[in-house]
Image (tube, rainbow, N blue to C red):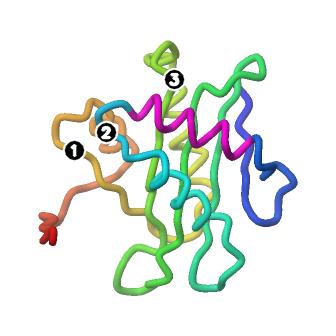
Amino acid sequence: MEIKRIDVKSDNNKVETLDEISKFLFKHLEQYGDKLESIQAAMEYSLSTDNSKGGFILAAYEDSEIVGAVVINRTGMNGYIPENILVYIAVHSNSRGKGYGKKLMEKTIAETEGDIALHVEANNPAKKLYEKLGFTNPYLEMRLKK
């Protein structure tokens, strides 16, 4: 498995590549995903040159096919909110159980400067992996949807 980083400094952020990654995430996030437009917006945020935005995308390939992807956004709120949020991570449904998710998470942790937050539903099987990698759940998240 080869993992490529895509950010504003890399030459990997071609429109075709980003389109392929967004469609991959939309399909393989399954019930834990968002609308395609939301995924694309998070990816655009991660590739922004605006100082208050940024982040990066990781794409994992096996035989030139995407088998996993990650989107990290910088929060711009250092000191009181984690500096980064892992917005999306997905592994191809046919490639799960091969350690790709763990490798993607390890690469994400290594490539990220500062703390990382993520949201995971309680029934998501990936929760166990996140806990093994050191993520904890010290807070209860509450939301008001209008």
Quadrant of residue 54 in the image? bottom right
The amino acid at mark 3 is: His
* Whether label 2 touches label 1, CB < 8 Å: yes
* Whether label 1 touches label 3, CB < 8 Å: no
How far is mark 2 from mark 1, CA to CA? 8 Å
- Residue 70: x percent and y percent? 55, 46
Q: Is residue 60 left or right of residue 25?
A: right
Q: Nearer the viewer, residue 134 or 5?
A: 5
Which mark identifies residue 32? 2
The N terminus: image quadrant:
top right
Q: Nearer the viewer, residue 115 or 44?
A: 44
Q: Which residue is the site of mark 3?
A: 92
Residue drawn at (77%, 49%) of the image: 15
The amino acid at mark 2 is: Tyr
Q: Helix or strand or loop: what does disc 3 sit on?
A: loop
Q: Nearer the viewer, residue 129 or 73?
A: 73
- Residue 146: x percent and y percent? 15, 72
Residue drawn at (52%, 60%) of the image: 42
Q: Nearer the viewer, residue 46 or 62?
A: 46
The amino acid at mark 1 is: Glu
Mark 2, residues whose alpha carbon is within 10 Å: few (<14), some, or many (≥20)? few
Q: Is residue 68 left or right of residue 34?
A: right
Disc 2 or disc 1, which is closer to the eye? 2
Mark 3, residues whose alpha carbon is within 10 Å: few (<14), some, or many (≥20)? some
- Residue 91: x percent and y percent? 50, 29
How far is mark 2 from mark 3, CA to CA? 14 Å
Q: Which residue is the site of mark 1?
A: 121
